[in-house]
Amino acid sequence: MDPEPTTPHRPEAASRPLEPPREVVRRLPLTAGQAEVVTRGREAVRSVLDGDDDRLVIVVGPCSIHDPVAGRGYAERLAGLSDRLGDELIIIMRAYFEKPRTTVGWKGLLTDPGLDGTFRIHEGVPMARSFLRDVLTLGLPVGCEFLDPIVAGYLADAVSWSAIGARTTGSPIHRQMASGLAMPVGFKNSVSGDVQVAVDAVDTARRPQVFPGTDDHGRTAVVTTGGNPHGHLVLRGGSAGPNYDRPGVADGVARLERAGLPPRLFIDASHGNSGKDHRRQPVVVAEVGERIAAGERGIVGLMLESFLVAGRQEAGAGPLVFGQSVTDSCIGWETTVAVLETLASSVGRRREALGAGVPG
């Protein structure tokens, strides 16, 4: 008799209820002051994208938040720097809680807050929201990447700027989500360096959408959006090389104009534009800053990966260095200050070159 066929072992599929967005928001609400910081941040970025404010938008912070205590320490320093450079720079703290992985790896504080593979998402969601509230209390607006559309229901009211990443910018689901978000959304070019896919995403997200989704009770629902007029392109380089240079920016601006979109974009100084070498981020900033100072207007924002301690470390390899990234390498605090001062100076020099005044 033939032996019984065997089935390879695999973990059993399972699910467990997650507290609905409405309940988490009710339990961890924004104060009037925190909500005002969110609104102020959104309006400031919109003004830049509309061409009514000549400041630069700077989205800067850790590649990912893995230690809320270190993240808050960074935010306290950044808030002081924001106050000092506020006439030239609109500083948004990068606070990423979800990490897209090309294959495997730590998926972020929201998914695995213990950094130990226990995936306590029910703890990670309120932990992420609490962190946003802490940063807003400092008067500092926050930027996030929304990787899972469900997460937006828990965090979006506390976010002033958001990104759709290189791996998801071509996703119809993410374009639909962005069309209903109440903040400006930056679409990154693809990992390969394809810029047109991000331009198409900006165009798509500007249009009203109707799609299956979830409501704030966590129930399946038909979602109708009005379109997001403040989607924009983010050049982050790719496998083909960087695209922050003058030809790369000119190509991005030309693609936006052909699509009938505002000719303004952001530069991500990390990722493909720095070859994932944090030491090259200041090099990117220096070149972009000189072009801005000379009067270039297409670049209206930059993204930087920065933390208290330069470099990166491997989670699970021993005691963690306080304030050092466990995902992509970041520039350290002292370098961050110097880089942002350089960009503030570039804005001031551009105003002198163009005869523009400080925004009111």
Image (spheres, rainbow, N blue to C red):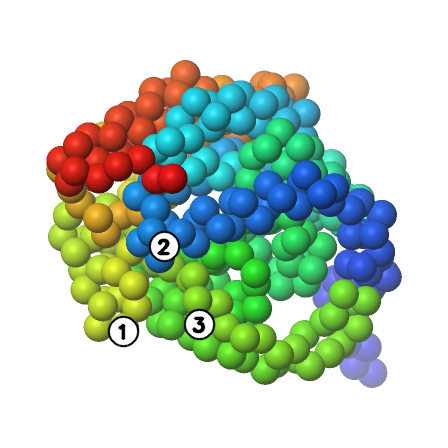
Indicate which disc residue 206 carries. Answer: 3
Residue 11: x %, y % from top left = 77, 60
Amino acid type at circle 3 is Arg
Indicate which disc residue 259 carries. Answer: 1
Q: Which residue is drawn at the image coordinates 26% and 66% (left, top)?
A: 256
Separation of residues labelled 3 and 2 (CA atoms): 14 Å
Which SS class for mark 3? Answer: loop
CB contact under 8 Å: marks 3 and 2? no
In the orientation shown, which residue stands out farthest toward the top? 334
Separation of residues labelled 1 and 3 (CA atoms): 12 Å
In the orientation shown, which residue stands out farthest toward the front? 360
Separation of residues labelled 2 and 1 (CA atoms): 16 Å
Amino acid type at circle 2 is Leu
**Mark 1 neighbour density, 10 Å: few (under 14) some (14–19) many (20 or more):** some
Residue 196: x %, y % from top left = 29, 68
Can residue 338 be seen? yes
Q: Which residue is mark 2?
A: 49
Which numbered disc, 3 or 2, marks the residue closer to the eye?
2
